[in-house]
Image (cartoon, helix red, strand yellow):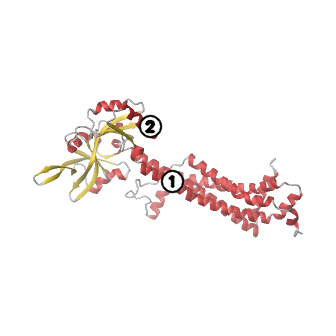
Amino acid sequence: MNLPFEFRIGWRYTRQGRRGRGKNGFISFISVMSVASIALGVMALIVVLSVMNGFQKEVRDRMLSVIPHIEVVSYAGSIDHWQDTAKLVASNPHVLGVAPYSSGQGLLSTGSSVRGVLLRGIDPTTENNVSDIDKQMAYGHLADLKPGEYGIVLGLDLARLLRLRIGDKVNVIIPQGRATPAGIVPRMRAFTLTGVFSSGHYEYDSSMALLHIEDAQALFRQTGPAGLRVRVDDMNKAPEISYEILKTLPDTFAVTDWSKQNRTWFAAVQVEKRMMAIILFLIVLVGAFGLVSSMVMTVTEKQSDIAILRTLGVSPTSIMSIFMVQGAVVGIVGVSCGVVLGLLLACNLDVIVPAIESLFGIQFLPKEVYFISSLPSDPRAGDIVPIAAFSFILSLLATIYPSWRAAQTKPAEALRYEY
């Protein structure tokens, strides 16, 4: 192979370090530890960022299967003639569906159990246009909610907490009271459980109840829907689309999108992702420090070789290139191993994590604490490529000082005590 002699000598020094004994063996050990540290850091970064990407994507998708992309509400508290407003909203080319809703806070009471819930009134005939709840029904059907029959659909965890089955009665209590001779008494109405949904999102499965919109309006004494739920063709463009919708509506309406409603949570995830990346990148930095140590020891050991090369006319720049090649090889091997191991782990977490949980009888993500109970993974090239590039650049930077010291070697002083 017609390769530059700097590369051939640098590659030879790298191979010699692997086979060496004594001092050479110790240098080789430090080099191996440097490679392992770089590989471990890259692997950990890829796995952790993939898990955080998967966690964010999974929570977002499950959240948006229940909540709308965009909500349109009226400052008056309810929307009269909502069909006209719905037609105006649906005229936007990015809108896929519009459905009315009513909502409020309440209590569910059955026997000795009482739970606070979000009561949401929906129209079963149009709800499929804006959510996936009908596909998430574990028991019953969304169409079983009929006006005047006062049926109710609960989340799976909420139904379990209240120990309810299909056909059981549950009392719905809302804070808006009515005046009686004994004082203000909260309004209460008995509902029949007609269905149970499971979105996979514990917050909604444990605290949301669905009513028919007409029953909800009667319960809350509303003259019309509280707002409109809107689904668009691109959830990531919901802020721009919501602004376009707002410009077409009268000033009495307000429009919000899902990113604003959950801004705090998503911002916290982004901050946590950045901090985890910085912390785990320190592992790569430790590997780079180890690489500096091994390179300094290699330069010290090869003083006579460097002096001979200099007497043969090799320039300081070429001497520096020889040792930078050696450091680059360590960086390439470490980064490559880290990327391969990281992708193998990130792409097989759905098999590895359940196996570990089953083996040790533990659960990494209790659904009572976290939004989801499984450990998702979403490796992205936008994370992996910068990780590999920065790690390799850091490895190269770690070789600059030892290589510069090698280039400054004076042949006469290095050969003075050689025989």
Provide residue 357's location: percent of width, then percent of height: 45, 60
Residue at the farthest left position: 181
- Report the amino acid beneath label 1: Lys
Q: Is residue 97 left or right of residue 357?
A: left
* Camera-side residue of 81 and 151: 81
Q: Quadrant of residue 145?
A: top left
Residue 330 quadrant: bottom right
Which sits earlier in the primary sequence, circle 1 or circle 2? 2
Q: Which mark is residue 364?
A: none
Q: Quadrant of the C terminus?
A: bottom right
Q: In this view, does 210 lie above or below 162?
A: above
Q: Report whether 264 appears left or right of 253.
A: right
**Nearer the observer, disc 1 or disc 2?**
2
Residue 198: image x %, image y %?
A: 34, 49
Disc ID at residue 240? 2
In this rendering, position of residue 11 left or right of residue 382: right
Q: In which quarter of the image is residue 404?
A: bottom right
Q: Mark 1 points at which residue?
A: 273
